[in-house]
Amino acid sequence: QVQLVESGGGLVQAGGSLRLSCAASGRTFSNYVMAWFRQAPGKEREFVAAIQWTTLYADSVKGRFTISRDNTRKTIYLQMNSLKPEDAAVYYCAAKIGLTDRRGAEYNYWGQGTKVNVSS
């Protein structure tokens, strides 16, 4: 059992930055794959980034977003720079055992999300 809690969402102008956090508890953290997904209103959930020993990014955010982890604090982060209106969504933290994966169905544990709004 793993519990995940996201924070850091808010309203930002296009071109600005936000840093999201996800705090984990309940199991050994260091060997879990951690990931960020997002879902915009009326849209399907989509992969954003994942991390274990290596990182994996969606093409739409590569070069703008950076995923990182702090195993001591049992926390992962998503630094989002050069934000675009199309980045607006609820961002979800997820976890699994194994290798990094872009498929949401492969992740066993999910947070409740933090909302990011980007104005033009």
Image: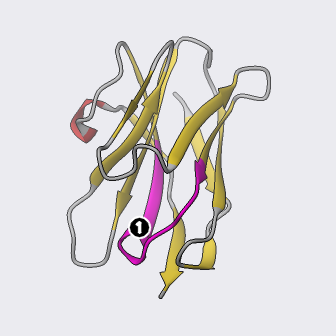
Q: In this view of the protein, which residue sits in the foreground, 14 or 87?
A: 14
Picture quarter containing residue 23? Answer: top right
In the rendered structure, does residue 106 fall within the stretch colored magenta?
no
Does the magenta portion include 85?
yes
Q: Position of residue 12 (x, y in %)?
A: 61, 78
Residue type (three-letter) at the residue carrying disc 1: Asp
Query: Count of labels shown?
Result: 1
Give residue 25's position: percent from left, percent from top: 66, 31
The region drawn magenta spans 79-93
Q: Residue at x 46, y 17 (%)?
A: 54
| SS under mark 1 | helix
Q: Residue at x 49, y 51 (%)?
A: 64
Using the image, determine if residue 64 lies above or below residue 100.
below
Residue at the disc numbered 1? 87
User: Percent x, y for residue 79?
Assistant: 62, 49
- The residue depicted at 54 percent of the width and 63 percent of the height is 82
